[in-house]
Image: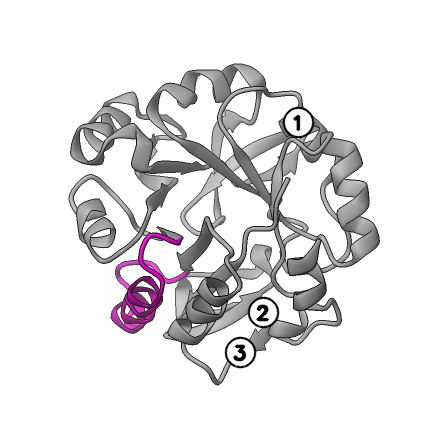
Amino acid sequence: MKFRPCIDIHNGKVKQLVGGSLRDQGDMAEENFVSEKDAGYFAGLYRQDGLEGGHVIILNGKDSEYFQASKEQALCALYAYPGGLQIGGGINDQNAKEYLNAGASHVIVTSFVFHDGAVSYENLRKLVSAVGKERIVLDLSCRKKDGAYYIVTDRWQKFTNETVSISLLEKLSEYCDEFLVHGVDAEGKSSGMEEDLVRLLASYEGNPITYAGGIASIEQIGLFGKLCQNRLDYTIGSALDLFGGSLSYQEVCSL
């Protein structure tokens, strides 16, 4: 179990958002924090502190007027920490190599691998052919509905028909190196993790999984470790003092 850092980029700025509040229309979201520093600053900090496998996420859609500015910030982070960061946001088989060539260790993909609410194994095969499964992280971020965790796409706005399950993780593991799972309804709220989701993910014994969403204290990190039996990695955003929260980044790094 280890801490994975993050750099979320929205409208050309490094931000921390309430995950469930993202809307493509008007590029709107409820903001917890907007940094005056660029993405390269945070990437350099993570490099200095020896944190690997963090994720850079572009939170604007490709049709947004802010997409290019957000992409430039993402590339700034990759240049600052070659090989140390993963990147997601609008990744497909056509543009994945661009980000890998810019320094990303992996590309993080969600929407491209889903079509009409289901997994597109054709698109997965295209992605693997383009960059190799060892460079792919599948983002299975999800929201709870009717007692199950449904995978959501398009910046967490659109429900698919797929639920997070051991059988799905096992099928998808043939096409990726890792999984990233945001508990979207806990994301950015610093109100505690999705405990049922953590338990579910911990029962899978295949590819590495990073969980994100709601962890906000040293005590909660301890609880997370117990719930997942130290099998999962975790990320923290809004709760860190680095992003305006009260949890010490340096203390988390020292765990």
Residue 220, position as x, y percentages in the image: 80, 50
Q: CA distance from mark 3 to mark 2?
A: 11 Å
Task: Assess whether residue 63 is covered by the magenta stretch.
Answer: yes
Which mark is on residue 30? 2
Determine whether 105 is above or below 114 in the image: below
| Residue 196 in sight in this render | no
Instruction: Tell me what residue is drawn at x 45 percent, y 63 percent.
Output: 47
Q: Which mark is residue 202?
A: 1
The quadrant in which residue 18 appears is bottom right
Quadrant of the rendering where the N terminus is positioned: top right
Question: Is the residue 116 above or below the residue 217 in the image?
Answer: above
Badge 1 amino acid = Ala
Task: Assign a secondary structure to mark 2.
Answer: loop
The residue indicated by pointer 3 is 34
> What crowding class fits label 1: few (fewer than 14 Cα within 10 Å), some (14-19), or many (20 or more)?
some
Residue at the limit of the structure toward the right, as seen here: 219
Neighbor class of circle 2 (other Cα within 10 Å; few <14, some 14-19, many 20+) is some
Which residues lie in the magenta part? 59-84
Q: Amino acid at mark 2?
A: Glu
**Residue type at the position of mark 3:** Val
